[in-house]
Amino acid sequence: MSAKTYGMSLHSLAKEEGLEDKILSELRLVSELFEEHPDYVKILDAPQIEHSELMTILNDDFFGKVNRYTLNFLKLLSEKHMVHHLSDCFKEYERIYNSENNISVVDVTTAKALNDNLLERLTERLEKKTGGKIVLKKHIDESCIGGIVIETDESRIDASIKTELEKIRKALTK
């Protein structure tokens, strides 16, 4: 089975149990934790370590801290030596969750951090345009010089000074 299939299956179970939000939140936190500690993931994926020892490690670290479905999901990935795919499982889970809840993830790249007022106004405008909820993922890229780049799965609006300067350079070199 692929990471996509595992993510879809977990979402289906979470939906049946009314735990979609909780498991989404836990998957996000565990994914971030695993990204910060790649050696831990290697241990959980290691075929040389006894199954019972891996289950003990997961129980010690996660029992009582995450929902039993999340813990059992981690155990299943460990049994299959697929813990390194947790991030991909999470992405698929989140994609389905967002689709079902009319949530669009929008990447916003600027040269400097936007203040809260600008972020709020941008979110309101995008929500009005899409008719759904918007989650902004903010990125700082000083090479933009100024302006903004807004990206969704369907479109890209590049109003950065860097791009405008590139257009002028190309026009002048023709």
Image (tube, helix red, strand yellow):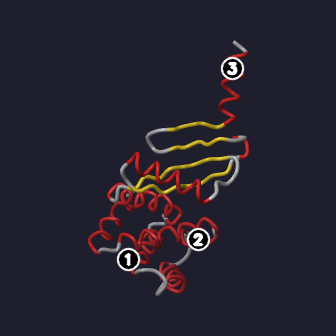
SS at mark 3 in the image: helix
- Separation of residues labelled 2 and 3 (CA atoms): 44 Å
Q: Is residue 154 left or right of residue 109?
A: left
Q: Amino acid at mark 3?
A: Lys
Residue on which disc 2 sits: 33
Instruction: Measure the alpha-carbon separation of dots 2 and 1.
Output: 18 Å
Which quadrant holds the C terminus?
A: top right
Tag 1: residue type? Tyr
For residue 170, which numbered disc appears in the image? 3
Could you tell me if the residues under marks 2 and 1 are in contact, i.e. CB atoms within 8 Å? no
Looking at the rendered structure, the secondary structure element under dot 1 is: helix
Locate residue 41: give its quadrant: bottom right
Is residue 134 placed above or below 29 in the rendered structure? above
Comparing labels 1 and 3, the label whose residue is closer to the camera: 3
Q: In the rendered structure, which disc, 2 or 3, sits on the residue that comes first in sequence?
A: 2
Choose mark 2 or mark 3, whichever is in front: 3
Residue 54 at x, y = what percent? 52, 79
Residue at 50% in and 50% down: 106
- Residue 169: image tag: none
Camera-side residue of 65 and 117:
117
Residue at label 1?
Answer: 69
Residue 152 x, y percent position in the rendering: 48, 45
Q: Is residue 122 above or below residue 85?
A: above
Which quadrant holds the N terminus? bottom left
> Disc 1 to disc 3, how far (Cα)?
55 Å
Frontmost residue, 105 versus 10? 105
Horizontal side of 93 relative to 28 (left or right) equals: left
Q: Amino acid at mark 2?
A: Leu
Which residue occupies the extreme top position in the image? 174
